[in-house]
Amino acid sequence: MSQKLFFSVLGLLLLGACESAESKQNDWLYQLQYAEPDAISNSEYETVVMDPTRDGSNATRYTNQEISSIQENGTKVLAYISIGEASAFKSYWSEEWGEEVDGTLEVSESAPDWLGRDPNPAWPESVKVRYWEEEWWRIIEEELNRIQEAGFDGVYLDLVDAFEYWGDEQTYQQELRLAGDPSNREDAAIRMMELVNRMAAYLRDTQADFEVFPQNAESILFFDDGEYLEAINGIGIEDTWFREDQAIDSEEIETRLSYIKQVQDADKQVLSVDYVRVDSPSQQDKERVEEYYLKCREQGFACFAAYMDRELDDFIPR
């Protein structure tokens, strides 16, 4: 092999290696536990989603100064908030409403009606809420005020898909059905969109450019008259191609992507997270992560390969 050809081949190999390494970089950061502003501020992420507190308590809220330090390099910081479930570890929770027993929340009979009674199997310290009730809005409103006071650029809304829970007749095998509950899936979806729209209007009344990102629940767009899509700035999506180490059925993927295309066609951002990363990865693990990035970037999404434990407690440098 000539010297010229050798260096040409070497250059191509190095270029391929650089492209492969670059393809492994996350585009955004999703960290809900142990987030440290100093580390994040040096990471050069364009978008960060983090809990507004360190452990759910008001005493550990991030300060305006800490959030500003992250934003100094142009990073957009979104505050995570669950709007479809209530959790016993949150500052708004009252001991009278119930307590955790062996890791599972047991809601008391005297708890307010807007609280569901059946714990989430995946997160047993949490229960669904009747999100259309004014009592829940007052809790949400107070949290939104604190988020804006801390200087966040927007909110990242989890459990928007709680509308599926209240819109499913099977739900009421566990929950006691109340007179004011949604009559069907469409009714539940409309009530959830009304909550998101109300939040967006409330936040932008004091900060016109405040951003709103729901997570998942993209099928709610089937019932949207256009107001919901107009109110949001983008969407976060989990488990699009993989559910941990299992590939997701192609039909399910295509159905979800058809809804997400509506968001993209409206020129709004898509933040994708698949939980595909492990410590000490095998070759198969590495290939799965690479496949996620390839498919994610083909769709034009911002991509985040998170750890399979779903704790979102790891800072992953960009």
Image: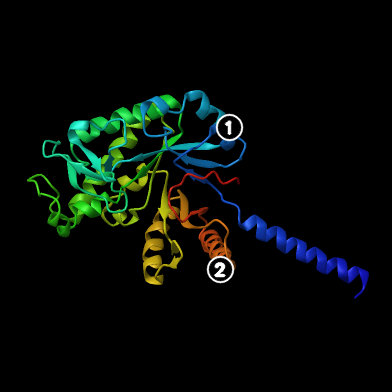
Residue 288 seen in render? yes
Amino acid at pointer 2: Gln
> Crowdedness of circle 1 by 10 Å Cα count: few (<14), some, many (20+)?
few
Residue found 47% across the figure and 25% down from its top: 63
Point out the tag, 1 or 2, that comes first from the N-terminus: 1
Residue 134 against residue 102 in the figure, above or below: above
Disc marking residue 284: 2
Amino acid at pointer 1: Asp
Q: Which residue is mark 1?
A: 38
Q: What quarter of the picture does the N terminus occupy?
A: bottom right
**How far across and down, in percent of the image, does residue 33 sit?**
45, 40
Mark 1: which secondary structure?
Answer: helix
Which residue, as the protein is rendered here, is positioned at the far front? Answer: 102
Nearer-the-camera pick, 208 or 317 = 317
The answer to which image quadrant residue 50 occupies is top left
**How far across and down, in percent of the image, does residue 251 sit?**
37, 71
> Crowdedness of circle 2 by 10 Å Cα count: few (<14), some, many (20+)?
few
Residue 134 seen in render? no
**In-image side of 59 versus 304 (left or right):** left
Residue 2 against residue 62 in the figure, above or below: below
Nearer-the-camera pick, 243 or 101 = 101
**In-image side of 81 versus 70 (left or right):** left
Which residue, as the protein is rendered here, is positioned at the far bottom? Answer: 1
Residue 157 against residue 137 in the figure, above or below: below
* Alpha carbon distance from label 1 to label 2: 34 Å
Marker count (numbered)? 2
**How far across and down, in percent of the image, does residue 256 sit?**
38, 62
Tell me whether the residue at label 1 lies in contact with that at label 2, contact meaning CB atoms closer than 8 angstroms: no
